[in-house]
């Protein structure tokens, strides 16, 4: 074996693995500290602050040890700062010295327009003087959140929060869904959005092979969702397949366990893949699905060198693949 002790790339990789291992150990220590604090008590300011600060450290440690993605990392950072620290300080009246004078002026405007204390305008229907005061109020809150981010957020989360706020919020929302969306159908729907976004990025970069594989994964996910949404119909079809001892081997009753070949067969028998007839031709959507499946299976290198004549996909190849993908999407959506 080659001596790698002086290979810079090897040493950098080893350093990264060491950092990950150290962060895993650190996460365990921090988790034990969090457990000692006990359940969160929103009536106890110190309790909330301690939990939030530990939460920030744990989320960074999890991210550095590759246990969570950047989406969950940013969500946890945002939750600790905005959802815990900021809300706790707001509730405790830490910002009243700046907010109360604005609130008093808002009350005067409401009184002037005969608005009761428990009544409010839609912001775009409010008088201009109210809108100006509301903007001042929101600006104070935004400044307080930014100050907390500057003081407590990790460098990576802070940079995104300050420099690309819209993207930061989008990442946080993806992280929130990843953490809290537990329903299989909902998670698969969110997963498909990620597949589509990355497929589009790959297409833009002319990385047609990876884009095509992702489009195949989207079709597979759509078929799983369709099966989950129609359990009675699918159960009947699976019973038929098993009783007829067909070539498609379906051992599990869970669509999430099936391969794309099985999903295509079930979809066909559920009448979700009707043929498309034109004046000249009849197009088999089942065959088109298998074409997409074969392209998706190029992710396996052994399969690729045996089944594909070329190691790459051209723009013309991709055009046909994308047309096939779009046709099957429309067909599944319409049945």
Image (cartoon, rainbow, N blue to C red):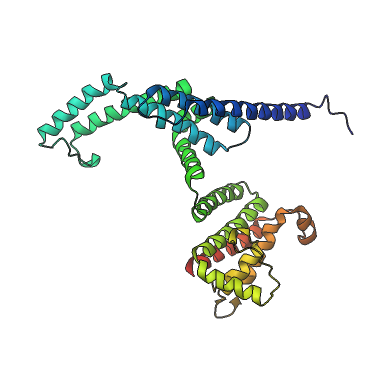
Q: Is residue 186 found left or right of 10 in the rendered image?
A: left
Residue 317 appears in view: yes
Give the number of callouts: 0
Residue 23 image position (x, y, % from top left)? 63, 27
Horizontal relation, residue 133 to residue 178: left or right: left
Direction right: furthest residue: 1
Left or right position of 100 against 244: left
* Location of residue 250 (image quadrant): bottom right
Tell whether 121 sits left or right of 177: left
Q: Residue 6, image x and y in percent?
A: 83, 24
Q: Residue sitting at 47 percent across and 22 percent down?
A: 152
Q: Where is residue 287 drawn, in percent x and y?
A: 64, 71
Residue 109 spot, x, y in % from top left: 15, 31
Residue 143 visible at all: no
Q: Is residue 97 above or below residue 121?
A: above
State the image quarter where residue 258 is shown.
Answer: bottom right
Q: Residue at x 46, y 20 (%)?
A: 151
Q: Does 226 appear above or below 245?
A: above
> Which residue is painted at 46% across and 27% down in the image?
51
Residue at 40% in and 32% down: 83
Which of the two residues, 3 or 238, is positioned nearer the viewer here? 238
The residue positioned farthest toward the top in the image shown: 97
In the picture, the quarter occupied by the N terminus is top right
């Amino acid at each position: 074996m080659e001596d790698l002790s002086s290979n810079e790339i090897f040493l950098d990789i080893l350093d990264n693995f060491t950092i990950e291992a150290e962060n895993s150990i650190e996460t365990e220590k921090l988790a034990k500290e969090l457990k000692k604090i006990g359940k969160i008590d929103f009536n106890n300011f110190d309790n909330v602050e301690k939990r939030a600060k530990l939460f920030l450290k744990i989320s960074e440690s999890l991210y550095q040890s590759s246990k969570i993605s950047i989406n969950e990392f940013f969500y946890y950072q945002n939750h600790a700062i905005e959802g815990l620290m900021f809300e706790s300080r707001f509730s405790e009246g830490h910002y009243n010295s700046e907010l109360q004078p604005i609130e008093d002026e808002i009350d005067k405007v409401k009184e002037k327009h005969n608005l009761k204390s428990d009544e409010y305008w839609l912001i775009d229907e409010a008088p201009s003087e109210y809108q100006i005061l509301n903007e001042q109020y929101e600006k104070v809150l935004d400044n307080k959140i930014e100050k907390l981010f500057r003081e407590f957020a990790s460098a990576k989360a802070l940079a995104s929060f300050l420099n690309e706020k819209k993207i930061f919020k989008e990442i946080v929302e993806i992280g929130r869904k990843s953490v809290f969306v537990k329903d299989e159908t909902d998670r698969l729907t969110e997963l498909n959005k990620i597949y589509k976004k990355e497929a589009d990025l790959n297409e833009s970069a002319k990385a047609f092979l990876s884009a095509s594989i992702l489009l195949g994964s989207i079709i597979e996910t759509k078929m799983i969702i369709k099966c989950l949404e129609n359990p009675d119909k699918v159960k009947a079809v699976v019973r038929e397949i098993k009783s007829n001892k067909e070539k498609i081997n379906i051992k599990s009753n869970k669509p999430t366990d099936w391969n794309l070949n099985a999903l295509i067969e079930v979809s066909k028998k559920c009448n979700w893949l009707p043929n498309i007839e034109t004046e000249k031709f009849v197009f088999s959507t089942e065959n088109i699905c298998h074409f997409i499946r074969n392209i998706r299976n190029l992710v396996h290198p052994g399969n690729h060198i045996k089944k594909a004549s070329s190691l790459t996909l051209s723009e013309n190849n991709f055009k046909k693949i994308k047309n096939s993908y779009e046709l099957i999407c429309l067909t599944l959506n319409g049945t």
